[in-house]
Each structure stands twice: as structure tokens, then as C-alpha cells.
Image (cartoon, helix red, strand yellow):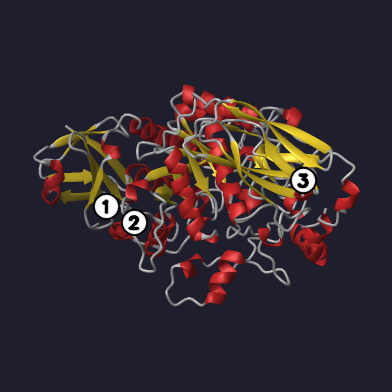
């Protein structure tokens, strides 16, 4: 088997050799030869829509053979065609329908060429009554799953005749067989752990010859990958989550696609993707977008360079592509009833289009949650993408939640690199840059970075301290599948995204059960579960944060509302610490004891408090 690197080089060599004729070859159909034939239609996207949406129109992308030479009509009183447009490629037409007065039903759209006609019956459905789109807040905790590596619920779909990469669990970059059915089967486990929200990395089709398991090289925006299941299974998973009072966040990618997408065989237009004379990769420097001194060259490479050799970069300056992408997200919200979207590689997209997209979604679903992946080196750059007023360059983002990489970095400096706990304190002192830092998504690890336990050198006390901070500070916490059982791999993506033990028949152990975990794993599992379950009923965790300057590696802070208070103390020392409590009086307000939710013990502090080495208290004040 070729290495991934050789695979990419070979693929790009072939791709670039034929790149200049991708679109032109697709449009060489002789219209005269087609006049005697009925118009051929291969695909309509979206396949259906809904009546009664606030958005008054829907754009259909129709692909077939020389459709630009056809006349498109619709015979209906309550629906009309605003526009029929073909771009460079005559095989596509874009039909903009005014559905502001339309009712649920089937509407025949006729494609006529000469005396020949083809009719498609386009359906507008009734709105999905199960769609909640309820959004997330600080009471929530996301459980991030890479479905291919979690649980194999249906071994029959491990491979598909229609998809090129087959199952091979021995290949770290291969398909291992995890699926949507597997996730559904473990909703009770996730709920019992205490997470309130399930976030799957993209489950949409990735028909790629290699490294397709992760889902970030989408080849069909409207279909689940058959190796994960089908659309109905995903919709059922969402419904089952809602029955358990859990929420679901969908992972989407607008910046790029996989080169196995139909578009790369038959481009709708030459400007559908960013094209270069030779393969050009992004510089991954998102800070250039907000940098007032950045060169146009660097900005262009950042936003128009390809994320990887097999991931063509989409050009959202094309209004038809932009509309296509925005509609696809709305389709999944209404169809499946999801509660949020995590948008991959957010700053790599055209920023104005992304701001428009957020407004487009929120107009339809006001409480819907959207978080952007903003992997940037500090709060200064992160805040550029978060709503709260115009930036100095005039750009006004509408995004409310960003991926708080500065918090992740501070956690690693403190417990991986053994810097002072002051690092987490200092990071939060920059919250003035955000309109509402409580909406930020915070995490210790995820699918792109080393697992926290491994990063912390498998130091269980430090892991507990970091976990306490993550789950009690401001923001919406996210934990990565397997963190709760101390999975520890890092480095290569194929390794850190390892299979959850017990997710496959025949696994040596089942870590979903107490019996299948080691003593250390059970100790940590019980620790994180205690905090997660407590969070579900804690009003204080939804409130404000007030913290004090750390001293002697002791960090103290308060989470509070008008009616609920919790006081957190983290001792990062190797020694027991005793300290005066007078400086915390504005939080303690004369109280001299409280219950530690981690141990159930009463903690007394009449003027002084003692806390053991490498220990955290989460104290509900009495």
C-alpha cells in the first residue's frame, strides 16, 4: 500500500495534468445532437425543500446534459421562477424559485428542448415538527465523536460497492467501521457520563481513495456516507438524543471538498474553486486576515490556497456556490432537527459570506448554535471573528461562538509544560476582547491535537486538575471521546483517533463498562462523571465568573448567579496549602463551610482554608 504522502503526490500529478480541461471537457456536448432527445437530468439539489420557511426562495442546482439549451418552466399559481441561470458549464442550470406563498405539495418543473420535454416533480414538504434548533449554552457539555473510530453498530455497512475505500481496521488511515448506528447505541452511555450534547465529525459522504474516515473531504453535501449509514439513521440518532434531553451538533465544511466530488469531474464554472497554475497550499496563517499590515499575497494564499492536495478550495465569491452551501446547512437543520453546527476551518472561508451565512441561519432558527473553528494563536486574533461590534477594518462578524484555542494552549502550558497555573488565569484576563466569553467552546483536546492525558505525561492528578478547570470555568466545554477513559495517544492523526476499546465485536476489553476499565481509568471516569452530572443541575455554572490572582500555585474563582454560588479552588502544588480566606469574602459572604461536590465532604473555612497537594475543591456554599 502506498504511503499517504505518495498517494497525494501521485493524485496531484494526475489531477494537475488534466486540471485545465476539467470544465471545458464537460461542456463539449453538441447542442444540435441533443435537440432530438429529451433533456437528461442526473441530479437535483436539494432534492426537496419545505413550505413555510421564513426564507422566501430556494435555489435548485440541476445537473444533466446540456441543460443550458433547455427552457425551464413551472405551471403553478403559488410558486414562480425568479431566475434560471447557467454558468460556464452548460450541463448545469440554477433555478431560483419564489416559494413565499407556496404550500406543501408536489410541483412539476418542465425542461423543454425543441419538442422534447422532461419533467421533474419537485416536493415542498410540511415543516419538521421535531426540529428544535434549541442551541447551546454554558449548561451544556459536548461529547466529540469521530464516528468511524467509536462503535461499529452495523458491520454490514463497513464497506460499500459505491465507495472506493474499503474497511481495513489495521490501517491507521483506513476505514474502521464505526457508524451512526454505533453512536445511537451509546447515547445512554454518553448521557450517563453527563455530557448533554453529541458532536460528530462529518458523517457526509467522503468518496476518496484514502484517508476518507475523518469526514473532512466531503463529496456529497446531502448524503450520509454509506459506511456510516444513511440520512434516516442520522435523523433517528438526533431524535433519540432529544428523547434523552440531549442535543446534537453537526460538523460542516464550506472551505473545501474532496476531489472525488462530482464537481471535480464536471465543474459548474471555472471559478467554482480557486485555481492555480500549480498546486498551491494555504499558509494556514489565519491571523493575516485581521492583520492591518498583512500583504495581499499572504492573505490570498491563506484563503485561496488548498487545505491539502486532495481538498480543492471552494470559491465563495461565486454567489451560486455560496447560496448552495448556505441552503445545504438549512436543509440539514430542518430535515434532521439538529441544535447546532460546528463550522470547520472558519477563517479560511470568505469572511463576508460566512457572516451572511450565520445571519441566514439565525433568521430561520433564532436560538440555533453555531461555533467556528478558529485555530488562532491568541484571544486578540480569535476575537476578530466573534460578534460584538465592528472591527477596525469595518468587518462585522455575526458569529457568537469560537473555538477557544487560547484556553487549550493555557491548559497545556500549565500541565504539559509545567508552567505556572497563572497561565490559565492570564488567558481569562483577556476576556474583555469578547462580547460574551461564556459562549466560547473550550476543550483540553480534540480530533486534531494530542490527547490531553498523553500531553500531561499520564499524570492523573494533573489530569484531574485540568478537568476541574475545564468543566467549571466560563465557556461551553467539549470533551473528546475516550478522554473519560484516559486514552492518551498523540502525534499522528491516525493514532490519536484510535478506536474506542469495546466498540467492535471481539475487542479484548470493553471500556464502556466498569469491568473493562483499569483502576486508574475507573478513578478518572468516576471523577469526570461526578462533575458532569453535577453540572446538569447547577445554576451557578451558567452564571458569571469571578477569579482571584493565583498565589503559591493556588487558583480560586467563583461561578455565580443571583441565586446560586459555587467556589472553586485548585491547588497545583506538590504540597498542602493553608491560606487566609479574607481576600475571598466577596464570594464567601460570611459563610464558613460548604460541600465539595467531588467528595461529598463538608469543607470548613473559618478565616483559613487548607487544601491537599494537587487537589481541587468545587464547593457549593451553605
Which mark is first along the chain, 2 or 1?
2
Please name the residue that numbered disc 2 is placed on: 424
Of labels 3 and 2, the one closer to you: 3
Relative horizontal placement of residue 57, taking residue 22 as reference (left or right): left
Circle 3 crowding by C-alpha within 10 Å: few under 14, some 14–19, many from 20: many
Which mark is first along the chain, 3 or 1?
3
Residue at position x 37%, y 54% in the image: 387
347, 601: nearer the viewer: 347
Residue at position x 25%, y 31% in the image: 601
Q: Are marks 1 and 2 in contact (CB under 8 Å)?
A: yes
Please name the residue that numbered disc 3 is placed on: 70
92, 172: nearer the viewer: 92
Residue at position x 23%, y 51% in the image: 547
Relative horizontal placement of residue 309, taking residue 249 as reference (left or right): right
Of labels 1 and 3, the one closer to you: 3
Q: Position of residue 46 (x, y in %)?
A: 64, 38
546, 281: nearer the viewer: 281
- CA gap, disc 1 to disc 2? 9 Å
Circle 2 crowding by C-alpha within 10 Å: few under 14, some 14–19, many from 20: many
Please name the residue that numbered disc 1 is placed on: 555
Quadrant assignment, res 132: top left
Residue at position x 48%, y 25% in the image: 242
Amino acid at each position: 500500500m502506498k504511503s499517504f504522502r505518495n498517494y497525494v503526490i501521485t493524485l496531484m500529478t494526475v489531477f494537475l495534468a488534466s486540471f485545465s480541461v476539467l470544465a471545458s471537457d464537460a461542456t463539449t456536448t453538441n447542442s444540435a445532437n441533443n435537440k432530438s432527445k429529451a433533456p437528461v437530468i442526473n441530479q437535483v439539489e436539494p432534492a426537496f425543500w419545505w413550505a413555510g420557511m421564513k426564507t422566501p426562495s430556494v435555489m435548485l442546482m440541476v445537473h444533466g446534459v446540456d441543460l443550458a439549451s433547455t427552457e425551464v418552466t413551472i405551471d403553478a399559481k403559488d410558486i414562480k421562477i425568479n431566475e434560471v441561470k447557467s454558468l460556464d458549464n452548460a450541463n448545469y442550470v440554477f433555478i431560483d424559485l419564489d416559494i413565499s406563498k407556496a404550500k406543501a405539495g408536489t410541483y412539476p418543473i418542465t425542461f423543454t428542448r425543441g419538442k422534447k420535454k422532461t419533467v421533474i416533480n419537485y416536493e415542498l414538504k410540511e415543516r419538521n415538527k421535531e426540529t428544535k434548533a434549541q442551541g447551546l449554552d454554558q449548561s451544556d457539555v459536548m461529547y466529540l465523536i469521530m464516528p468511524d473510530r467509536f462503535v461499529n453498530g452495523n458491520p454490514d455497512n463497513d464497506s460499500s460497492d459505491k465507495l472506493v475505500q474499503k474497511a481495513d481496521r489495521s490501517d491507521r488511515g483506513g476505514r474502521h467501521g464505526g457508524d451512526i448506528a454505533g453512536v445511537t447505541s451509546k447515547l445512554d452511555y454518553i448521557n450517563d457520563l453527563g455530557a448533554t450534547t453529541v458532536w460528530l465529525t462529518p458523517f457526509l459522504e467522503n468518496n476518496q481513495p484514502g484517508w476518507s474516515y475523518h469526514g473532512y473531504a466531503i463529496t456529497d453535501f446531502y448524503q450520509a456516507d454509506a459506511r456510516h449509514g444513511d440520512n434516516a439513521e442520522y435523523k433517528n440518532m438526533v431524535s433519540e438524543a432529544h428523547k434523552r434531553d440531549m442535543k446534537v451538533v453537526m460538523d460542516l465544511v464550506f472551505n473545501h471538498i474532496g476531489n472525488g466530488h462530482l464537481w471535480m469531474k464536471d465543474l459548474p464554472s471555472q471559478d467554482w474553486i480557486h485555481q492555480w497554475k500549480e498546486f498551491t497550499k494555504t499558509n494556514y496563517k489565519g491571523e493575516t486576515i485581521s492583520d492591518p499590515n498583512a500583504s495581499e499575497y499572504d492573505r490570498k494564499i491563506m484563503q485561496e490556497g488548498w487545505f491539502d492536495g486532495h481538498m480543492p478550495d471552494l470559491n465563495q465569491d461565486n454567489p451560486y456556490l455560496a447560496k448552495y452551501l448556505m441552503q445545504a446547512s438549512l436543509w440539514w437543520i430542518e430535515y434532521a432537527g439538529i441544535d447546532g453546527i460546528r463550522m470547520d476551518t472558519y477563517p479560511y472561508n470568505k469572511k463576508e459570506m460566512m457572516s451572511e451565512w450565520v445571519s441566514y441561519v439565525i433568521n430561520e432558527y433564532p436560538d440555533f448554535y453555531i461555533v467556528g473553528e478558529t485555530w488562532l494563536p491568541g484571544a486578540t486574533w480569535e476575537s476578530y471573528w466573534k460578534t460584538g461590534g465592528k472591527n477596525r477594518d469595518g468587518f462585522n462578524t455575526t458569529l457568537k461562538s469560537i473555538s477557544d484555542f487560547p484556553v487549550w494552549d493555557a491548559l497545556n502550558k500549565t500541565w504539559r509544560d509545567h508552567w505556572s497555573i497563572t497561565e490559565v488565569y492570564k488567558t481569562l484576563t483577556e476576556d474583555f476582547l469578547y462580547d460574551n466569553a461564556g459562549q466560547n467552546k473550550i476543550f483540553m483536546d480534540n480530533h486534531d491535537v494530542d490527547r490531553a492525558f498523553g500531553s500531561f505525561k499520564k499524570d492523573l492528578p494533573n489530569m484531574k486538575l485540568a478537568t476541574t478547570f475545564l468543566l467549571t470555568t466560563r465557556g461551553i466545554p467539549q470533551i473528546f471521546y475516550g478522554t473519560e477513559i484516559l486514552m492518551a495517544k498523540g502525534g499522528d492523526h491516525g493514532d490519536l483517533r484510535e478506536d474506542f476499546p469495546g466498540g467492535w465485536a471481539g475487542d479484548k476489553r470493553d471500556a464502556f463498562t466498569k469491568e473493562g476499565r483499569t483502576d486508574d481509568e475507573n478513578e478518572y471516569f468516576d471523577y469526570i462523571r461526578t462533575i458532569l452530572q453535577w453540572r446538569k443541575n447547577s445554576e451557578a455554572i451558567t452564571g458569571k465568573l469571578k477569579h482571584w490572582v493565583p498565589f503559591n500555585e493556588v487558583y480560586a474563582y467563583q461561578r455565580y448567579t443571583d441565586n446560586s454560588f459555587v467556589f472553586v479552588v485548585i491547588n497545583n502544588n506538590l504540597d498542602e496549602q493553608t491560606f487566609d480566606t479574607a481576600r475571598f469574602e466577596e464570594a464567601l459572604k460570611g459563610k464558613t463551610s460548604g460541600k465539595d461536590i467531588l467528595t461529598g465532604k463538608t469543607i470548613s473555612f473559618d478565616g483559613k482554608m487548607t487544601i491537599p497537594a494537587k487537589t481541587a475543591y468545587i464547593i457549593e456554599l451553605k
